[in-house]
Image (cartoon, rainbow, N blue to C red):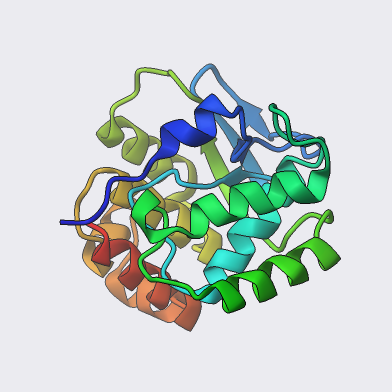
Amino acid sequence: MSQERKIEWLNNKRIIYRRNPINDKPTVETDEYMYYENGTYECYTLFNTSAKIPTYKSLKWHFLVLYYLNEEGIEGDIVSLEDDMRYIFKFIANKENGFVTFFISNYKLKEIIKNVLTIGGEPPINRQRKIIFKDFTGLSIREKLSIVGQLIGRKKISKEDIYDTMICISDTAEKITISKIAKLLNCSSRTIYRNMSKELKKEKERLNEEI
């Protein structure tokens, strides 16, 4: 049985791990969602699904995002930004806290942290998103999936559309399949296969492994 993620530790420390776009303006905004016709790279939603961090590369990316979102530091007795970040990173990297799938040596962790503290602060490379659902809307996962289909299912399918749909399916705790993606986007499975990059295929596998 996998270790439950200790997300309450982040919440109690008021560590920011999610943020909606702050510069990009939505094409359409309702009480339930924001839709960006041309996409946005400014949406950061760490730990939004049950998927855990599976690789060093992914761990480093999570560290960069946490650094970027918490540049003003965290609450407590620690006073320097670098100490704050080391404190957070070590907690995240500890497998017993439920965020990662692997054990990491102290030497490797120090190496990653040193690199992050050297280059951190700039917006990390991020996936483009088109649909961002607001918190506490009361929408069921099925209703969200329906909205995804309505908004992007009638247009030319992009890699970003496929990614948004995979995330919605993952939130239902169901396996992601090509046929499910195609049905929600109102297109053929052939279209999904044609637009499915190697990166998206790996992401699909990763999300399914955590269900």
Residue displayed at 34% across by 23% down: 139
Position above or below: 10 against 104? above
- Please say if 72 is above or below 174: above
Going by the image, does 158 lie left or right of 115? left
Q: Is residue 177 visible?
A: yes
Q: Tell me if residue 78 comes above or below residue 41 in the rendering.
A: above
136 or 153: nearer the eye?
136
- Residue at position x 56%, y 20% in the image: 30
Whether residue 133 can be seen here: no
Residue at the far left: name it. Answer: 1
Quadrant where the C terminus sits is bottom left
Choose top left, top right, bottom left or bottom right for residue 194: bottom left
Residue 158 image point, x, y percent: 53, 64
Q: Nearer the viewer, residue 137 or 61?
A: 61
Q: How many marks?
A: 0
Please, is residue 29 above or below residue 88 in the view? above
Residue 125: % across, % down: 71, 63
55 and 75: which is toward the camera: 75
How far from the left and from the top, in percent, is residue 22? Answer: 77, 34
Residue positioned 65% across, 46% down in the render: 37
- Give the x, y percent position of residue 123: 78, 54
Decide if residue 137 is on the left or right side of residue 142.
Answer: right
Quarter of the rendering containing residue 1: bottom left
Q: In the drawing, does residue 180 fall left or right of residue 50?
A: left
Q: Is residue 198 left or right of residue 172?
A: right
